[in-house]
Amino acid sequence: MITCLRRPGRQAQTVIHPDAAGIDLAAEVHYVAVPADRDPQPVRNFGTTTDQLIVLADWLQKCQIRTVAMESTGVYWIPLFELLEARGLEVCLVNAKHVRNVPGRKSDVQDCQWLQFLHTVGLLHASFRPAIEVCVVRTLLRHRDSLVRAASAHLWRLQKALDQMKVLLHRAVTDITGTTGLAILDAIVAGERDPQKLAAHRDHRCKESVAEIAAALKGDWKVEQLFTLRQSLAAWRFHHQLADECLMEIHRLAAGIESRTEEAPPPPAKRGKQPDEVVRTLLFQKFGVDVTAVDGVNTHVGYTLLTEVGPNLDRFASPENFASWLGLCPNNKVSGNHQLSVSTLPVSNRLATALRMAAQSLSRVESPLGDWFRRMRAKLGPAGAVTAAAHKLARILYSMIKTGTAFDPTKLGNPVLTRQRKERSLRKQAALLSFSLQPANAGAVS
């Protein structure tokens, strides 16, 4: 039965969730509000220890509460969220920004009462949260990303020490963490200072010659900078060791996520560097399609998609909803039939960031999707093209996973029309330079 709820000074509101409660979260105390007819003291506060959280859950069940609304405040909501969900209550995790956007005054009530009222009349929408087994893997993947960032910070300190000693190893070789760079760094830490002997550690695949590397290794070996270099190198290796251990644990836990198929993926169709076959097979079994077959999408993007959303996209009704959740849709602002802005909302989403990085790599891809990206870059500029391409990748991945259809690059454009467009562009440029184009087989004798 739908009834009406009237608050002082307000119109009657239709009750959507009569058995709703509101919780205001904090680090040391949680304030909880239930309907006034469920308990003589409808607003209570509880501590944040495990015993207090159990008492809180018992009180809500005693009051016959079925759904609870709480704001996503830091990480304080996670223990209580998991406990209430395990008790069978429907937990509505609300974005704090959405609550602030709801019109109304709440100066005469506590935050928990305001949340309880808004949830009762159906003015709150739950934020997306994947299944618990997906959240477990997501936690470790985010932890691994933080380890990689920490390792990068130590690598910057290492390069700073080299610069201050005028030892330009990071300018002589492309990557100081490669075979040649690490061998020379280990020799420096071991006490070698002769540039020729250090350059002798050059790998045969290195493009720079021994003489070029030796010239870059002449510097003044400062004691304090050598100490910094030694510790930074050890810290970089330690963090990468932790990241590798974390990745192994991610593989083990990701195997527990529900699979759509047990088959092996088809041979990779991409040219160039091939993805890790173990990770590619795992992603194929979870999604049912090879997401790495999409141009620009590698195993890292696929893992981010798996851990941030999960293998099931049923919570998103359409590709438009999925792209909007990612913050990749235009935020149209119109006033008086005038369009004020179409820029996207500033959404912090790890999957959106991964898709933007994938979109940037399309500039070097020779494919219909790469051609489309280059046209968008000429039309919208680099930033606009990256956002548009990330939006397109999100829609492609959504359609592939929802329908179980493999990626088909030929559907992204007509090859004949693409060739004609390129030919027109080349002829136009040739005409501007007073040249004319002829087909390569124009002079062949039939």
Image: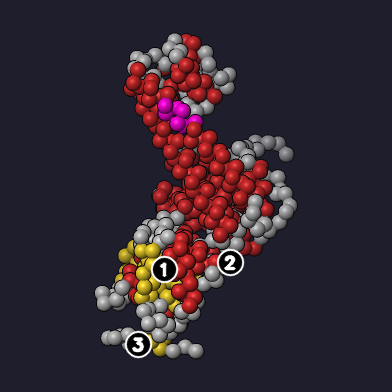
For the residue carrying disc 1, how many other residues have a C-alpha within 10 Å: few (<14), some (14-19), or many (20+)?
many
**Mark 2: few/some/many CA within 10 Å (<14, 14-19, 20+):** few
| Disc with the residue nearer the chain's start (1 vs 2) | 1
Q: Tell me the element at label 2.
A: loop
Observer-nearest residue: 362 or 439?
Answer: 362
Nearer to us: label 1 or label 2? 1
Alpha-carbon distance for marks 1 and 2?
A: 23 Å
Q: Is residue 399 visible?
A: no
Q: Residue 407 location, x and y as percent? A: 64, 54
Residue located beneath label 1 in the image? 70
Tags 1 and 3 touching, CB below 8 Å: no
- Left or right: residue 321 compared with residue 292: left
Q: Is residue 252 magenta?
A: no
Instruction: Count residues near mark 3 (Cα–Cα under 10 Å), then give few for <14, some for 14-19, many for 20+.
Output: few
Residue tagged 3: 6
Residue 47: mark: none
Q: Is 180 situated above or below 60?
A: above
**Image mark count:** 3
Task: Tell me, yes or no, whether the two marked residues, 1 and 2, touch with CB atoms within 8 Å.
Answer: no
Residue at image coords 32%, 65%: 340
Looking at the image, which residue is at 44% across and 78% down? Answer: 20
Three-letter amino acid code at the position of disc 3: Arg
Q: Position of residue 186 (x, y in %)?
A: 49, 20
Magenta stretch: give its range.
231-237
Rendered position, 123 above or below 319: below
What is the C-alpha distance between the residues marked 2 and 3?
A: 36 Å
